[in-house]
């Protein structure tokens, strides 16, 4: 499947759950919890949307109401779908990517089976070079782009929720609040700052905060600890937030 590219047209020839038409994996593999619940499987993409006066409407019917943790996955799926627009006239295209002509050939298949060069590194900000686990860095990268599912972002997707930060119970939850301004993370950050004799104001947004953090020059050894720390603090706060949200757990800062 990795040698085949699906270019969405009217959605009649590409299978919604099974084919790799969004991202590098099928929607079935990316959202297994939703796939298990969905009513319709083995159908082309055009079975899952309709055009209304207000625009494109996706219909992913499930066999029962979703639990809280499934709602987050469902919202991620809708976010993926919001980035594509099927054509009303052009047919879908299924392209063999290993040949310039897009036509399948044994020669290009053979070439594709030979060892390939390492994948190109992501053209990404400085945090991708940080000495931290990839899941920490991936989370920070998404957070810096306001792409994590905080309550305000879920509400933008149309979900009806009461917006309250579960870490401080005093303000609305947003990425910038949770990871920069919330009293919960501020306390953790101040404790850490004091070990480095650092004080002062912090920037308003998560993305500018990362740049601010990156700007400190602390020497080779301390710099490694410093870079690891922000990744670990953000990840720990997100994990704590999710524990409070989904498991009613509560830890102290
Ligand atoms: Zn808060």
Image (cartoon, rainbow, N blue to C red):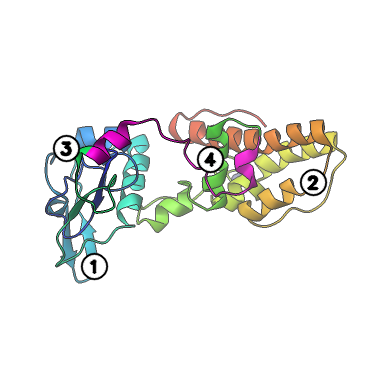
Give the distance between the C-alpha atoms of the residues marked 4 and 3, in whole angstroms. 31 Å
Is there a contact, CB below 8 Å, between mark 3 and mark 1? Answer: no
Answer left or right for 81 relative to 192.
Answer: left
Label disc, if present, on residue 63 of the rendered structure: 3
* Residue with the mark numbered 1: 55
Residue 65 in view: no
Image: magenta residue range: 107-130
Residue at image position (63%, 39%) is 129
Is there a contact, CB below 8 Å, between mark 3 and mark 2? Answer: no
**What secondary structure is marked by label 1?**
strand
* Residue with the mark numbered 2: 216
**What secondary structure is marked by label 2?**
loop
Q: Position of residue 111 (x, y in %)?
A: 31, 36
Q: Nearer the viewer, residue 151 or 115?
A: 115
Is there a contact, CB below 8 Å, between mark 4 and mark 2? Answer: no
Give the distance between the C-alpha atoms of the residues marked 3 and 1, in whole angstroms. 25 Å
Give the distance between the C-alpha atoms of the residues marked 3 and 2, in whole angstroms. 52 Å
User: Does the magenta-highlighted stretch encompass residue 127?
Assistant: yes
Is there a contact, CB below 8 Å, between mark 2 and mark 1? Answer: no
**What secondary structure is marked by label 3?**
loop
């Amino acid at each position: 499947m990795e040698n085949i590219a699906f270019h969405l047209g009217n959605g009649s020839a590409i299978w919604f759950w099974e084919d790799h038409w969004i991202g590098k994996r099928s929607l079935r593999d990316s959202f297994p919890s939703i796939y298990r619940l969905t009513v319709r499987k083995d159908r082309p993409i055009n079975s899952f949307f309709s055009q209304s006066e207000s625009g494109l409407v996706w219909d992913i019917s499930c066999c029962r109401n979703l639990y809280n943790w499934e709602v987050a996955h469902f919202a991620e799926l809708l976010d993926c779908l919001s980035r594509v627009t099927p054509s009303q006239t052009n047919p879908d295209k299924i392209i063999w990517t290993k040949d310039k002509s897009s036509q399948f050939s044994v020669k290009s298949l053979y070439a594709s089976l030979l060892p390939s060069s390492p994948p190109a590194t992501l053209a990404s900000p400085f945090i991708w070079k940080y000495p931290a686990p990839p899941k920490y860095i991936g989370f920070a990268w998404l957070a810096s782009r306001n792409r994590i599912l905080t309550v305000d972002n879920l509400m933008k997707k149309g979900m009806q929720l009461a917006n309250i930060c579960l870490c401080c119970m005093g303000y609305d939850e947003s990425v910038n609040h949770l990871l920069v301004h919330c009293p919960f993370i501020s306390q953790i950050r101040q404790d850490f700052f004091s070990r480095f004799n650092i004080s002062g104001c912090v920037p308003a947004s998560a993305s500018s905060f990362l740049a601010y953090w990156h700007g400190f020059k602390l020497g080779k050894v301390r710099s490694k600890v410093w870079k690891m720390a922000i990744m670990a603090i953000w990840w720990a706060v997100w994990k704590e937030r999710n524990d409070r949200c989904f498991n009613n757990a509560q830890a102290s800062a």
